[in-house]
Amino acid sequence: MVEVKINDEVKVGGNNPCFIIAEVGQNHQGDIEIAKKLIKAAKDAGANCVKFQKTCLKEKFTKKYLERPYDNPNSWGKTYGEHKRHLEFSESQYRELFKYAHEVGILCTASAMDMVSFDFLVNMKVPFIKIGSGDSNNLLFLKYAASKQVPLIISTGMVDKSAVKTIYDIISAQHKNFCLLHCISAYPVPYEDCNLTVIQDYMNTFDIPIGYSGQEIGTAVALASVALGAKASC
């Protein structure tokens, strides 16, 4: 099996232990001190990596969508754009977070939610870049990501096996330093819908590491995915 080389010391796949990614996303609430606490918590829990989300709002959303009222008890602004801007860190803040993660001894990266954000993360020299299920059928984005020749971890929620084969074909035409994650895009996922046998199906189909991206409550399903052979868990 092909291994994904994250850096000179860390590889995903083969006989290596499951690579554990602790998802922060935007649960930092736009507060860098909360983000640092979550990085430290991930390290203390034994995770290999902590992951955020990076979005260029002007690239991802239309002006009209960003200006729409966002009347929500959890909103950080009067419009959706104000809310989303509050949750985005600047380049200097990301550098501070990556430095802190290095100091506590854990890898740190982010999901790229668009091409501009992908380039941002490439320039930040993150160990790998995650592509979420929402872009798993964004063929233009996948081709662009593959052309950059950086390690990738790609979730496969909301697509069938034929679409996963398309993802594999697009990326592997450029390189095989990537991993696919089985994912069910529901929040939360009922245990009976997790369909973990897909992991073994993908392992028998694709010559790259296969992992699991879980949206369920608790840790039981993630543990079961590792028992079934998942080489990365997010």
Image (cartoon, helix red, strand yellow):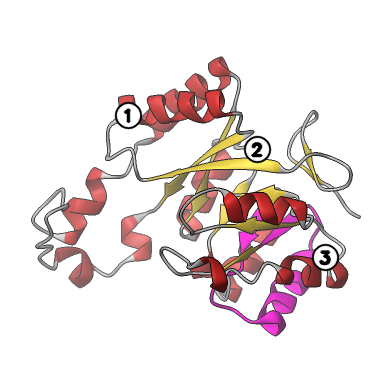
Q: Residue at x 37, y 31 (%)?
A: 35
Q: Please, what is the three-letter code of the amino acid marked with disc 3?
A: Met
Would you say the residues marked 1 and 2 are in contact, meaning their CB atoms lie under 8 Å apart? no
Residue 36 forms part of the magenta stretch:
no
Would you say the residues marked 1 and 3 are in contact, meaning their CB atoms lie under 8 Å apart? no
Q: Earlier in the sequence, mark 3 or mark 2?
A: 2
16 or 189: nearer the viewer: 189
Q: Which mark is residue 127?
A: 2
Q: Please, what is the three-letter code of the amino acid marked with disc 1?
A: Ile
- The 10 Å Cα crowd at callout 3, few under 14, some 14 to 19, many 20 or more, is some
Q: Position of residue 11 (x, y in %)?
A: 79, 39
Q: Position of residue 227 (x, y in %)?
A: 76, 52
Q: Residue at x 72, y 51 (%)?
A: 226
In which image quadrant can residue 87 be found? Answer: top left
Q: Is residue 148 visible?
A: no
On the rendered structure, is 205 left or right of 128? right
- The 10 Å Cα crowd at callout 2, few under 14, some 14 to 19, many 20 or more, is some
Q: Secondary structure at mark 2?
A: loop
Q: Secondary structure at mark 1?
A: helix
Residue behind mark 3: 203
Q: Earlier in the sequence, mark 1 or mark 2?
A: 1
